[in-house]
Image (cartoon, rainbow, N blue to C red):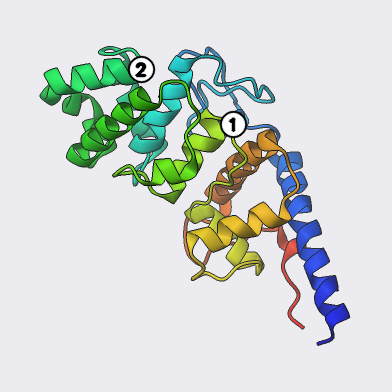
Amino acid sequence: MTTKDNSLILANVQDNVNLIYEKLLETYSYQGWWPFLSWDSTNPRKSGAINGYHPGDYDFPKNNFQKFEIVIGSILTQNTAWTSVEEALKNLNKLIEFTPESLLDYSNNHEEEFKDAIRCAGFVNQKTNYLKNISNFYIDIEDKIPSRDELLKIKGIGNETADSILLFAHKQKEFKVDAYTKRIFSYLGYINEKDNYMTIKQFFQNNFSGDVSMFQEYHALIVEHAKRYYTKKPYGLNDKTLNDFKVKKL
């Protein structure tokens, strides 16, 4: 293969990563992530949970309560479905304000009640500790936007959770990778199924030309699309929407 051929393939990959975004947006429209308990709006075009979403409005989070709701939700959603997270958030909302001070105070003084509130999200002991850790961290940094490295030093915060917090709570241009992202783009041939998190993240950071709002939207659209075609093996079997974007083997 010549250098010219390599350049052409690279250009096609960059084009396609952006065209896939446009195709998914055309197919599913604006998703309105991140959902909030206090926001009286729905997205009926979504599958699964539809309450609290705000399609096309990227002014969120509008206050520090919503910002910390994203932080809490990003931890609770580890290894569980959003419906369970939503239930846990509703339970917590009856007990605390969504601030690090309120969460820390209640969880320290009423630990069993706190655990009961989030039990539906699973891994209750771990997540209780993780939520305490992140609360202490946010109290320490006050109103500062955390760096990715700072978040990753907190026990309970891995790559995906850190990028979720930065992208949705702090509007930082960090591409969030999840299992759905890996399934779709390995099926299409742009990444290897065994690529690690940072390799895939860097692929998107290098090739997707969107702004922060489009980074948010792309992740949401990937999730929406994957729910239809990538939940059961063989992944992508009936994915006619993105079939034209499959990498052609030379």
Q: Amino acid at mark 2?
A: Thr
Q: Position of residue 73 (x, y in %)?
A: 39, 31
Q: Amino acid at mark 1?
A: Lys
Residue 145 as seen in the image, left or right of residue 105: right
Q: Position of residue 190 (x, y in %)?
A: 66, 66
Q: Are marks 1 and 2 in contact (CB under 8 Å)?
A: no
Residue 104's place in the image compared with 209, above or below, is above
- Residue 130 visible in rendering: yes
Tell me the number on the disc at residue 66.
none
The quarter of the picture where residue 92 lies is: top left
Task: Residue at 41% x, 30% y: name it.
Answer: 71
The quarter of the picture where residue 136 lies is: top left
Task: Residue at 61% x, 28% y: name it.
Answer: 32
Pick whichever, 47 or 220, lies toward us.
Answer: 220
User: Along the polypeptide, which appears first: circle 1 or circle 2?
Assistant: 2
- Residue 237 visible in rendering: no
Pick whichever, 44 or 168, lies toward us.
Answer: 168
Q: Position of residue 159 (x, y in %)?
A: 44, 50
* Local SS, label 1: loop
The residue wearing badge 2 is 99
Tell me the number on the disc at residue 171.
1
- Is the C terminus in the top left, top right, bottom left or bottom right quadrant? bottom right
- Is the residue marked by circle 2 packed among few (<14), some (14-19), or many (20+) residues within 10 Å? some
Pick whichever, 146 or 117, lies toward us.
Answer: 146
- Is the N terminus in the top left, top right, bottom left or bottom right quadrant? bottom right
Q: CA distance from mark 1 to mark 2?
A: 19 Å
* Local SS, label 2: loop
Q: Position of residue 156 (x, y in %)?
A: 30, 44
